[in-house]
Image (tube, rainbow, N blue to C red):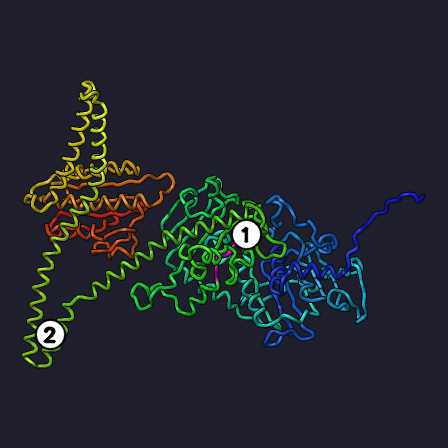
C-alpha cells in the first residue's frame, strides 16, 4: 500500500500571459499611451512629452521607429523599480483611504491603482528602456526589458518554437551618473521651460507596426487634450496650480500643432453664445436629496421628490420611493437648438452652421473623477447614459438628443467609492446598484430639462415668431406701396383708385379697432368670470349639500327645530358670497359701468384679492399690500382697475404654482401702493420673464403658459391706455424681490407728466 503524500503546487504562467493580459486590459494604441500619460500625472509631473520618431506622413512607423515618453515627475528609486514596477498588479497605489491615495508632492488623487502601465508599454512595442531619476539623487537608473527576440505572444524565439515561463523573462537595471535626467531647456507647446533634476524617460522600440495611421494619432491627441477639464464646473476646481498638467506631442523632434486645444476654445465660445439652456454649478446632494444649479443665470433648487415624475422605474417600482445610492456629484450641461432657423431674426442668434454643428456633435457628456476624465465617456460614438436607447424605446420627444447636449458630470474617489473604473480603463464597472442609480439620476435630470425648460424655450420661440409674422403682415404698408407706385406712373385714374382703396381700408380699420375694444372688454370679463366661477361653483355645491342636510333632518314630514336655524344661517352665508361675487363681476360689464370716479385703490384691490383667497391658500401663496406715503386714489372706473389686478394676480398664481421653490423660500406676491407718486409696483418671486420675451408680453396672443390665451397683459395695457395710464416692467430700483420674479409698475400720471 502506497503511503499518502501531499505536494505543493505553484502557478507557473507562461510568458505569453504578459501579452494576453495586455491585449485584454489595453484595447488599442490610444488607450496604451493614455495610461503612460496618466502615470506621469501620478508622478506629480508638470508636463509630459510624447515623441514619435521614424513615422512617415501617414503615421506609419518605419523599421527603426520609436515612441519616447518623458516627464519631469518624481522619478523612481531602485526599490520602486524592483518591488513595484516589476510586479504588475502591485498594491503600491491601492488604498481605500482618500488621503493615502494622493500623491506626495502635489496631493493629486492617483489615477492608476492596478499597475497596468507596463502592459501599456508592451502593447506598443517589445523593447523598453526606462531612464529615471528620483529626488536627492545624483544617479539615474536605467531599466531595460528587451523581448524583441520573441515573436508575438512569446511562442517563438529567433524563429524557433519556445514556451518560456513568465519568470524566465528578465530585465537589467543599471545605475549610472545622471546624464539624461539633467536640467535642460524643453519646449512645451511653444513655451520654453527648464526641466528639473527628477523625472522619467521611457523609450519604446520594436513597435508593433499594425494599427498605426493618422486617425490613431488624432485620437491620441484628442484624448490627451480632453483629459483635462474643458468645462467651468471642473475647471473651477482645477485652478489649483498642483492640478495643472501639460501634454505635448512631437514628431522627429518637431513640435506638432495643438489643433485640439484650439477646437476646445471654439467649443467654449459656442457654449457661451449659442446654447439656449446653460446649466452651471450643478450639484446633487445625496444627503439632502436636493438638486441645485444655475439655469441661464437663475439659481434653482429641486428636491429629488419634485423631479421623481421624470425618474426611471428603478426609483418608482412598487410605489417604494427610494433615493439614489451613488453619492453626491456635480454637473454642467449646455443645450443647443439644432432646428434654429438662420433666416429668422431670433433663430440666427442660435443657429449652428455646419462647422459649429460638427464641433457640438464631437462632444457629448463627459465624466470627470477628481478633475480627470473617465474614458471614453464624452466621445461622439459613446452613449454611456443610454440616451439613444431611451429615445428609441420610449418617446423620442421625452429626451434631448445626444447631438444637442454637451456637458460633464463630476465625481470623486472619496464621495463616490462605489463608482469604480473598469480594469480595461473604458468607463465604469456596470455591476451594482450605485452605477445604475448614478446613470438613472442623470437621465432623470436630462428628461426634466427636455420636458420643462426646453419645452418653454420652444414655446416662447414659436409665440415670438407668430407675433413677428402678424406685425409683418400689415396691409397699410402694402397699400402705401401701391399708392407710391401709382403716383410715380402719372396715371391719375390709378391714383384715384388707390386713394379710394386706402380710404376704404382706413375706414374698415377704424371699425375693426372699435370691435377690438369690445372684444377686449368681453375677453376681460371672460377671464374674470373664469376666476370667480370656480369659487362660485364650489359654494353652489356646498349650498346643495346644505339643502340635502335639511331634507334628511325632516322626519315624518317636519323639520327638526334645533337644527333649522344653523342650516339656514349656512345657506344665507353662501348666498351672500355668490351675491358678492356677482356684484363684483357686474362692475366689469359695459352696461353697468359708471363714469370715472375717485377710487381708493387699496379698497378695490382688497376686494379682488378675496376672489383669489382660496386659490392662494391652497397653493401656500402669501400676498402683502403696503402703502408708501399717502393713500393711492385714482380717477378711473372699477372695471379697468379690477381687470388689471385680475390679470396680474392670475399670472402670478400660475407661475408661482408651476415653478419650484428654492430652499427656505415661500411663494410671495408684494404690492406697494405709492400715493405720493401716483403709481403702484406689483411683483412676485416666481421665475420672472426671460429677456427674450419682454418685447412681446404686452402683445395680443403671446403666452408661454400651457393653455395660455395671451390676452391678459395686453388687455390690461389697452384698458389703462384709454385713461392715459401706463403699465410697464418695473425698473431695477423698483424691484421688490432681489433675485428674481416678475415686476410691473402701473403709473397713473398722464403720459406727459409721467415721473
Viewer can see residue 108: no
**Count of marks, rendered view:** 2
Identify the mark nearer the N-term, 2 or 1: 1
Q: Position of residue 510 (x, y in %)?
A: 8, 61
Q: Position of residue 537 (x, y in %)?
A: 21, 38
* Residue at far top of view: 562
* Residue at far bottom of view: 490
Task: Say whether residue 142 is left or right of residue 291.
Answer: right
Viewer can see residue 707: yes
Task: Say whether residue 159 is left or right of residue 419.
Answer: right
Bin the neighbour count of mark 1 within 10 Å (Cα to Cα): few under 14, some 14-19, many 20 and up: many
The alpha-carbon separation of the residues under discs 2 and 1 comes to: 70 Å
Task: Say whether residue 661 is left or right of residue 609.
Answer: right
**Residue 365 painted magenta:** yes
Q: Position of residue 308 (x, y in %)?
A: 43, 44
Task: Please report the residue visible at 53 percent of the width from the left and 57 percent of the height from the top.
Answer: 377
Which residue was labeled with disc 2?
483
> Which mark is nearer the camera, 2 or 1?
2
Q: Position of residue 496 (x, y in %)?
A: 5, 75
Report which quarter residue 638 is drawn in.
top left
Asked if marks 2 and 1 touch (Cβ < 8 Å), the reply is no
Front residue of this view, candidates 292 and 289 = 289
Tag of residue 166: none
Front residue of this view, candidates 570 and 432 = 570
| Quarter of the rendering occupied by the N terminus | top right
Helix, strand or loop: magenta stretch: strand
Which residue was labeled with disc 1?
369
Q: Secondary structure at mark 2?
A: helix
Front residue of this view, candidates 708 and 289 = 708
| Magenta residues (range) | 363-372
Amino acid at each position: 500500500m502506497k503511503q499518502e503524500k501531499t505536494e505543493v503546487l505553484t502557478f507557473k504562467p507562461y510568458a505569453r500571459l504578459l501579452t494576453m493580459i495586455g491585449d485584454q486590459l489595453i484595447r488599442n494604441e490610444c488607450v496604451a499611451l493614455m495610461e503612460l500619460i496618466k502615470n506621469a500625472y501620478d508622478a506629480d509631473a508638470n508636463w509630459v512629452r510624447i515623441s514619435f520618431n521614424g513615422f512617415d506622413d501617414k503615421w506609419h512607423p518605419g523599421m527603426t521607429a520609436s515612441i519616447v515618453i518623458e516627464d519631469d515627475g518624481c522619478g523612481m528609486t531602485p526599490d520602486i523599480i524592483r518591488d513595484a514596477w516589476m510586479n504588475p498588479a502591485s498594491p503600491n497605489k491601492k488604498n481605500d483611504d482618500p488621503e493615502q491615495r494622493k500623491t506626495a508632492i502635489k496631493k493629486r488623487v492617483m489615477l492608476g491603482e492596478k499597475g497596468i502601465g507596463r502592459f501599456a508599454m508592451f502593447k506598443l512595442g517589445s523593447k523598453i528602456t526606462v531612464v529615471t531619476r528620483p529626488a536627492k539623487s545624483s544617479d539615474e537608473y536605467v531599466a531595460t526589458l528587451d523581448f524583441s527576440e520573441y515573436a508575438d505572444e512569446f511562442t517563438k524565439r529567433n524563429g524557433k518554437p519556445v514556451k518560456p515561463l513568465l519568470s524566465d523573462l528578465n530585465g537589467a537595471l543599471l545605475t549610472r551618473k545622471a546624464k539624461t535626467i539633467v536640467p535642460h531647456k524643453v519646449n512645451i507647446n511653444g513655451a520654453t521651460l527648464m526641466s528639473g533634476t527628477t523625472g522619467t524617460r521611457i523609450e519604446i522600440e520594436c513597435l508593433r507596426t499594425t494599427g498605426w495611421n493618422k486617425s490613431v494619432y488624432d485620437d491620441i491627441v484628442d484624448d490627451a487634450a480632453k483629459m483635462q477639464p474643458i468645462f467651468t464646473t471642473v475647471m473651477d476646481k482645477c485652478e489649483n496650480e498642483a492640478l495643472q498638467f501639460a501634454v505635448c506631442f512631437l514628431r522627429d523632434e518637431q513640435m506638432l500643432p495643438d489643433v485640439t486645444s484650439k477646437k476646445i476654445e471654439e467649443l467654449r465660445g459656442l457654449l457661451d453664445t449659442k446654447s439656449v439652456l446653460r446649466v452651471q454649478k450643478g450639484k446633487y446632494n445625496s444627503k439632502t436629496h436636493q438638486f441645485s444649479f444655475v439655469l441661464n443665470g437663475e439659481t434653482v433648487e429641486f428636491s429629488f421628490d419634485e423631479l421623481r415624475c421624470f425618474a426611471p422605474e428603478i426609483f418608482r417600482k412598487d410605489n417604494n420611493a427610494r433615493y439614489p445610492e451613488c453619492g453626491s456629484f456635480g454637473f454642467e450641461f449646455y443645450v443647443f437648438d439644432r432646428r434654429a432657423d438662420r433666416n429668422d431674426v431670433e433663430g440666427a442668434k442660435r443657429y449652428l452652421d455646419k462647422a459649429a454643428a460638427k464641433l457640438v456633435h464631437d462632444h457629448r457628456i463627459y465624466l470627470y473623477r477628481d478633475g480627470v476624465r473617465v474614458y471614453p465617456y464624452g466621445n461622439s460614438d459613446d452613449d454611456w447614459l443610454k440616451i439613444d436607447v431611451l429615445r428609441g424605446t420610449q418617446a423620442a420627444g421625452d429626451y434631448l438628443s445626444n447631438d444637442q447636449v454637451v456637458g460633464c458630470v463630476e465625481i470623486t474617489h472619496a464621495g463616490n467609492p462605489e463608482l469604480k473604473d473598469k480594469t480595461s480603463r473604458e468607463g465604469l464597472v456596470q455591476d451594482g446598484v450605485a452605477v445604475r442609480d448614478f446613470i438613472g439620476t442623470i437621465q432623470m435630470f436630462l428628461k426634466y430639462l427636455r420636458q420643462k425648460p426646453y419645452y418653454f424655450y420652444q414655446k416662447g420661440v414659436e409665440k415670438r415668431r407668430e407675433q413677428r409674422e402678424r406685425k409683418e403682415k400689415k396691409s397699410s404698408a402694402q397699400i402705401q406701396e401701391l399708392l407710391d407706385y401709382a403716383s410715380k406712373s402719372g396715371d391719375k385714374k390709378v391714383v384715384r383708385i388707390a386713394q379710394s382703396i386706402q380710404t376704404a381700408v382706413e375706414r374698415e380699420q377704424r371699425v375693426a379697432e372699435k370691435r377690438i375694444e369690445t372684444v377686449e372688454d368681453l375677453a376681460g370679463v371672460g377671464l374674470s368670470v373664469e376666476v370667480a366661477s370656480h369659487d362660485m361653483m364650489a359654494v353652489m355645491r356646498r349650498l346643495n349639500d346644505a339643502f340635502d342636510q335639511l331634507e334628511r333632518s325632516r322626519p315624518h314630514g317636519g323639520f327638526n327645530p334645533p337644527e333649522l336655524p344653523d342650516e339656514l344661517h349656512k345657506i344665507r352665508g353662501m348666498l351672500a358670497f355668490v351675491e358678492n361675487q356677482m356684484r363684483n363681476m357686474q362692475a366689469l360689464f359695459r352696461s353697468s359701468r359708471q363714469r370715472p370716479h375717485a377710487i381708493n385703490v387699496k379698497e378695490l384691490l382688497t376686494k379682488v384679492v378675496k376672489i383669489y383667497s382660496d386659490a392662494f391658500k391652497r397653493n401656500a401663496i402669501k400676498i402683502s399690500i403696503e402703502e408708501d406715503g399717502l393713500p393711492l386714489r385714482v380717477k378711473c372706473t372699477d372695471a379697468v382697475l379690477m381687470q388689471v389686478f385680475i390679470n396680474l394676480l392670475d399670472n402670478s398664481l400660475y407661475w408661482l404654482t408651476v415653478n419650484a421653490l428654492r430652499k427656505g423660500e415661500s411663494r410671495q406676491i408684494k404690492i406697494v401702493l405709492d400715493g405720493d407718486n401716483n403709481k403702484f409696483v406689483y411683483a412676485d418671486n416666481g421665475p420672472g420673464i426671460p429677456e427674450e420675451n419682454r418685447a412681446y408680453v404686452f402683445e395680443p396672443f403671446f403666452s408661454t403658459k400651457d393653455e395660455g390665451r395671451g390676452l391678459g397683459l395686453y388687455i390690461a395695457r389697452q384698458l389703462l391706455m384709454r385713461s392715459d395710464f401706463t403699465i410697464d416692467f418695473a425698473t431695477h430700483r423698483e424691484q421688490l424681490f432681489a433675485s428674481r420674479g416678475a415686476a410691473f409698475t402701473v403709473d397713473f400720471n398722464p403720459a406727459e407728466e409721467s415721473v
